Amino acid sequence: MITWRSIARTFKRSPAPLRAQVRQLSLLEHHSHNLLKEFKLPVPPGFLVTTPEQAKNVVSEINGPTMIKAQVLAGGRGKGKFNSDGKSGVRMVNSPTEAFKSATNMLGHFLTTAQTSKDGLRVDKLYVYKAIPIAQEYYLAMTFDRQRASPVLLVSSSGGTNIESNVDNLHKLSFGLSTGITDEIHAYIQAELGFSDAEMKDIHRILVQMVQLFKEKDATLLELNPLVRTEDGEFICLDAKFAFDDSARFRQKEIFALEKRSPEEEEEHQLAGLGVSYVRLDGNIGNIVNGAGLAMATNDLISLYGGKCANFLDVGGGATKEALSRAFGILNKDQRVKGILINIYGGIVRCDMIAEAIVAAATEMGGFKCPVVVRLQGTNSEKGLKLVEQSGLDNLVVEAEFEKAAQKIVEQTPAVEV
């Protein structure tokens, strides 16, 4: 199935076959640990803090080396940098005083990683737990093999960040949700990873609980990275990543209630509730278009004339004035947007209704902050164009021809700084 989101994402990568993409539920680390504990999977005792004083008190109680981890929806926190002191989002501290200092430089500041924008993400919560003496890191994950239509277990003796450079060491084992971890899988893992009989008992118990969690919570991904063996021979899950079947929201209400969205995902979520498909892109020309095909053509034409689109925004055939006003509001707040092209072909949606929404939104916002080019064609287009022209709005140009409209907005918008 092709989604509007998958269509729009093609503008962010080189040409490739379209694939369905669904935004997955993302959990912060402390929520993931709580879920692991619910299924009796071993995790270190952890505490969520929101102030430097709380961090100091927790480390005082732990009375030993302690990990402090920024709670944001981005990978690579350990290699990221804060805008405050240039240090990473994962730190080990050895005293309450050191914890207070680190928390002060983390809370309320922005962390930039390989998976964030250049501005980074604001950190308002920290997860604090006792540092674990690690003897060995492993990688365990369960997901679905779409080609085989089967769940698959992924296992490696290279865990943590080492998994990225040791993909050849990743073992893939298909299993059934009804059969779970069979004797054959058990024997294969022990032989390949060299676990002793005593260690394999712990690993088997962890795998059995993973299958139960994976099945009962409608997960599409359950990743333990790393699962560590401590110097005392215990196995502990230090970090976990989950994805859940979006179609199972009605069954997994408690989990989806924990959903934490990035700012761009929140925008998409709000507009989706109003019947508007929105995806943030990398340019500075905002688009409001009706229909996925017209949206793609609009993006292509803007690119042809040297512009770069800031979004894919399809108001669809049944967009309301409320939805359009919300769309205008989001583009108006987006500091990257330096020009807007409104390209509507009236069929199901009437051009005069679009025109009324444009005027109403502009009036409510006190006018547009940047140049706006409006192209209306189709049902009631003449009436709509007249409404726009008679509105007296500044920064607004009407253009009936598609190519000229795209060319005009590119000409009136500053080039994107590379």
Image (cartoon, rainbow, N blue to C red):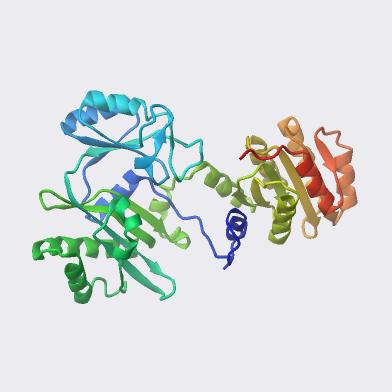
Q: Position of residue 416 (x, y in %)?
A: 66, 40
Q: Nearer the viewer, residue 308 or 396?
A: 308
Total numbered circles: 0
Q: Quadrant of residue 251?
A: bottom left
What residue appears at the point 58 percent right and 64 percent down from the top-left corner? 16
Q: Is residue 103 left or right of residue 266?
A: left
Residue 167's place in the image compared with 373, above or below, is below
Q: Which quarter shows the N terminus? A: bottom right
Task: Specify whether residue 270 is in view.
Answer: yes
Q: Quadrant of residue 51?
A: top left
Q: Nearer the viewer, residue 333 or 347?
A: 333
Residue 63's place in the image compared with 189, above or below, is above
Q: Which quarter shows the C terminus? A: top right
What residue appears at the point 71 percent right and 51 percent down from the top-left corner? 303
Q: Position of residue 294 (x, y in %)?
A: 73, 58
Q: Position of residue 76 (x, y in %)?
A: 38, 45
Residue 77's place in the image compared with 347, above or below, is above
What residue appears at the point 9 percent right and 62 percent down from the top-left corner? 198
Q: Is residue 27 left or right of residue 140?
A: right
Q: Quadrant of residue 8?
A: bottom right
Task: Specify whether residue 53 is in view.
Answer: no
Q: Position of residue 148 (x, y in %)?
A: 41, 76
